Amino acid sequence: MKLNTLILIALCAALPALAIAKQPKMNVTDEAASLYEEEDPTITAECIKNVSVVHTLVKAKQFSEAYEPWMAVYNECPNANKSIYTDGAKIVDYLYANTTDEAEKQRLAQLALDMCDMRIRFFGSDTKYPTAYILGEKGLEYCEHFPGDPVKDKAYPWFKQSVTELQGRSKLTVLVEFFQVSYNMYKQEPDKYGEQFINDYSLVSSLIQQQAADHTNKNASAAAQQKDYVDNLFAVSGAANCDQLDRLYAGYVAANKENMENLQKVMNLYKKVRCTESDVYFAASESAHKMQPSEESAAGCARMCMKKEDWKGAIKYYEEAISLIEEEDDDDKDDYLFNIASIYFDKLKNYVEARRYARMSLEVVPSQGRCYLLIGMCYAAARPYSESEYGAKAAILNKTVFWAAVDKFQTAKQVDPTCADDANKLISSYSKYFPTKEDMFDLPGEFGEGTFIVGGWINERTICRAAH
């Protein structure tokens, strides 16, 4: 009597699972369909008892002890309860991690996939965990248990269907692994999978962003971290060009004009892939700067002014970016100062200010050959001696600026060998304009004994050399 009562209670407990098992089966994979061609197995009282035993052992983390009764349930009544699959995954994962036998590992790895197919066969119509969810789990199982496949492209269609159908309800781990597999495929065959990878990034990035922005989601913080990982992987992948990024983010930036956090992430992404001349990047920078001026937003506005040929505006924003740099994080300060120096030299022809900012940049990073090259070009372009003050001597004296210029080119390649080729070309070009021996002979008092101080704002001591 007591046994019959227990069986009746167990059967009642199993009714929800039985109801699910008898629902119409949808989206069943070919693998699952081939596992059971006959009628659904009969659910016996013994089977229900074993389901309970297995669940109790798994809760107690006694996975080895749970394996034998679980295997009996899995083989005899796989349609009895969903817990057969959730518990089974834990058992198989444990056994896989705790065996060194390669054949056994392969058997367990295949069993993990077969379980997913069987679960789809009998519980694919479950409302909470439908076929799409199970396919995501199958992809995760494959990525974990088949290390011999570096690309994991076999899992791609499972992940793709799962994410496409579940959208924002997708597991965070599924989204990240899906993107990782897409990346692997792209890196193996860029021409074949480039567009697919970009589309997958757009889908995954937006779905993870939804989860990160959902304050009711307990995994929101983890989603935000994974969003950064996905963005960074995309940035370094080489798949993205600026036009493609603009198509992905133009609407996003327009919709987030008052969301500082999201605007900042877009600016960081564009900076990483060197798309800082993009109108979308400018729009994000401008909106961010209006709300909360920062180094990054000010630099973005400076680049926008550069594109519009508003040179004074660019200098103003670069100056602002410098003033907003945190003391412990001044990695870009030398770049901002050099950019200002370049504007003064190339666009405004103000060589005094160009040298001043180049020197300031060198104070931050002394090994910048580019700054010495720029200063040298400022000297070469200068004419510090006027005819009104020096008369006929001015033409010869102005040739001395090339001595000072070549000195800077020599220093450039000494402190930074990477610019040696540029420095040598400039040295060759400007050495031709040195004063001749006749020039130097005609002005002995000006040149002293082999040394000379170039006058005017340059005020540099140099060595006298005749043109060859």
Image (cartoon, grey):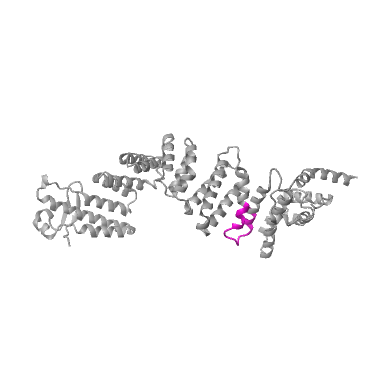
Q: Dividing the image into 4 quarters, which one contains the N terminus?
A: top right
Residue positioned 70% across, 56% down in the render: 31
Tell me where residue 405 sits by quadrant.
bottom left
**Residue 375 placement (x, y as % from top left):** 26, 50
Residue positioned 69% across, 63% down in the render: 104
Apparent side of residue 319 relative to residue 140 in the rendered image (left or right): left
The number of numbered badges drawn on the structure is 0
For the stretch drawn in magenta, the main secondary structure is: helix
**Residue 434 placement (x, y as % from top left):** 17, 57
Tell me where residue 399 sits by quadrant.
bottom left
**Vertical comparison of 284 with 44: above or below:** above
**Vertical comparison of 246 with 106: above or below:** above
Apparent side of residue 52 relative to residue 259 in the rendered image (left or right): right
Residue 91 appears in the figure? no
Image: magenta residue range? 140-158
Apparent side of residue 124 relative to residue 182 in the rendered image (left or right): right
Residue located farthest toward the right when viewing the structure as drawn: 1
**Residue 359 placement (x, y as % from top left):** 29, 48
**Would residue 243 be counted in the magenta stretch?**
no
Q: Dividing the image into 4 quarters, which one contains the C terminus?
A: bottom left
